[in-house]
């Protein structure tokens, strides 16, 4: 995750992170990416059920829940362990988490145990009553997915009217006083909607937006051909940077982030070096503290059956199951070669990634994307859009 507003527009400085000792248990949510201990944010894919059928769903969700999904009691046991372990955030995802009947009970329980709680949802099931329950349960943030304007979104979501329903969900959460943001996964069919998405953020007073690069997992692997080209990725990120700077110049309180392609970090740094050289040192420091891709380190995932994964995109690989062993023990056990490798990956990386001058601020980007394309976890990430010359290979 790259905090574009924080870094490009100077909304955060190294002293802000140092004020809290760069500790996960002390830092506010907007500074967690700069913490030193990197306790994992845990994504819980709490159900396989979803009311939509999105073409890029990494979880390959279904219309009905799996009969063997974790029970309320099992989820509470997991939450107890996560709280004791010091995980800073539990993100309720799916499928569609609002289809879990115990979502609000579990959210309240996690808050009582000291966890920050977040919902990742398609938003179409959120009315005023649901928004009120989200607020009452203490969820600190709701991320609602919109993958384009109007019909563009509806095609990707597999349901006519999904755009209007999601927008109504955003409005309901905002009216209920719940911090709410927009999530969009970039692809060839929607990146031309980016300007209109930024207009929507301003028109609807949406305070936060995360722009995700496509990861080739689940149904997302089937539409790999619909991913942006490297040149299109640069164009999209340029537009995101430009519109973010415009928001900042007009003093609009809208936070912009990009997610799932850590090439955005060095690309942002190069822009700061060219346009704001006096800030380049502090931006470099913050990017180094961010640490680049955090799969297996600062982010992990648990699926609806209790299986623990390196992140939410690694559904094909599990380190163990929380029904048999606590997450905290699974996560710290480096006897699994993939877990050990992800935690100390730099010596294992190959090709451009191994030789890149920005390795300390990218950390090899997404290993699951490299595996999907090259059948090699340690191969270069094919979504890196920087040239050989830009990463210090001098065109060789």
Image (cartoon, rainbow, N blue to C red):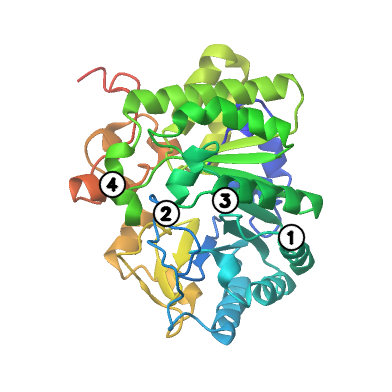
Left or right side of 133 for 384: left
Q: In terms of image quadrants, where is residue 351?
A: top left
Dot 2 crowding, Cα within 10 Å, few <14, some 14–19, many 20+: many
Discs 3, 4 touching: Cβ within 8 Å:
no
Residue 163, x across and y down, in percent: 57, 45
Spot occupied by residue 2 in the image (x, y as percentages of width and height): 53, 38
Element assignment for label 1: helix
The residue at 47%/69% (across/down) is 49
The residue indicated by pointer 1 is 131
Q: CA distance from mark 3 to mark 4?
A: 21 Å
Whether residue 11 is visible to the viewer of this picture, yes or no, is no
Front: mark 1 or 3: 1
Q: Dot 3, crowdedness within 10 Å: few (<14), some or many (≥20)?
A: some
Label 2 – label 1 distance at C-alpha = 31 Å
First along the sequence among labels 2 and 1 = 1
Q: Disc 4 or disc 1, which is closer to the eye?
A: 1
Q: Residue furthest front?
A: 160
Labels 1 and 3: the sequence-earlier one: 3
Write down the quadrant of residue 191 in the picture: top left
Q: Which residue is mark 3?
A: 36
What numbered label is drawn on residue 295?
Answer: 2
The disc, 2 or 3, on the residue closer to the chain's N-terminal end is: 3
Badge 2 marks a residue whose secondary structure is loop
Along the horizontal axis of the image, is 267 left or right of 231? right
Residues packed near mark 1 inside 10 Å, few (<14), some (14 to 19) or many (20 plus): many
Location of mark 4 (residue):
347
Mark 2 vs mark 3: in front: 2
Residue toward you, 191 or 278: 191
Q: Is residue 171 left or right of residue 265?
A: right
In space, the residues marked 2 and 3 are separated at their CA atoms by 15 Å
Q: Is residue 201 above or below residue 24?
A: above
């Amino acid at each position: 995750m790259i905090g574009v507003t924080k870094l490009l527009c100077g909304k955060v400085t190294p002293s802000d992170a140092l004020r809290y000792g760069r500790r996960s248990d002390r830092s506010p949510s907007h500074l967690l990416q700069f913490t030193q201990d990197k306790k994992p944010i845990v994504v819980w894919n709490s159900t396989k059920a979803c009311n939509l059928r999105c073409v890029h769903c990494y979880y390959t969700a279904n219309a009905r829940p799996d009969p063997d999904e974790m029970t309320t009691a099992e989820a509470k046991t997991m939450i107890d362990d996560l709280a004791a372990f010091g995980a800073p955030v539990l993100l309720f995802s799916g499928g569609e988490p609002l289809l879990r009947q115990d979502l609000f009970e579990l959210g309240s329980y996690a808050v009582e145990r000291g966890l920050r709680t977040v919902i990742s949802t398609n938003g179409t099931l959120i009315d005023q009553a649901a928004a009120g329950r989200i607020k009452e349960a203490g969820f600190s943030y709701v991320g609602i997915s919109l993958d384009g304007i109007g019909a563009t979104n509806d095609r990707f979501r597999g349901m006519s009217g999904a755009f209007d329903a999601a927008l109504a969900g955003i409005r309901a959460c905002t009216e209920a006083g719940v911090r709410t943001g927009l999530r969009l996964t970039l692809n060839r069919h929607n990146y031309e909607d980016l300007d209109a998405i930024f207009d929507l953020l301003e028109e609807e007073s949406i305070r936060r937006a995360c722009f995700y690069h496509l990861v080739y997992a689940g149904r997302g692997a089937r539409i790999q051909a619909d991913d942006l080209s490297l040149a299109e990725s640069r164009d999209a990120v340029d537009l995101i940077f430009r519109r973010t700077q415009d928001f900042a110049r007009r003093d609009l309180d809208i936070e912009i982030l990009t997610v799932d392609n850590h090439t955005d970090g060095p690309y942002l740094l190069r822009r700061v070096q060219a346009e704001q050289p006096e800030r380049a040192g502090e931006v470099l420091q913050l990017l180094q503290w961010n640490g680049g891709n955090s799969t297996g380190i600062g982010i992990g995932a648990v699926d609806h059956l209790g299986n623990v994964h390196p992140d939410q995109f690694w559904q094909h690989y599990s380190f163990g199951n929380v029904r048999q062993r606590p997450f905290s023990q699974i996560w710290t056990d480096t006897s699994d070669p993939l877990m050990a490798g992800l935690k100390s990956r730099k010596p294992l990386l190959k090709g451009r990634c191994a030789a890149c001058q920005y390795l300390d601020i990218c950390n090899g980007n997404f290993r699951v994307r490299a595996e999907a394309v090259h059948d090699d976890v340690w191969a270069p990430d094919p979504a890196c859009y920087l040239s050989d010359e830009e990463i210090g290979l001098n065109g060789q």
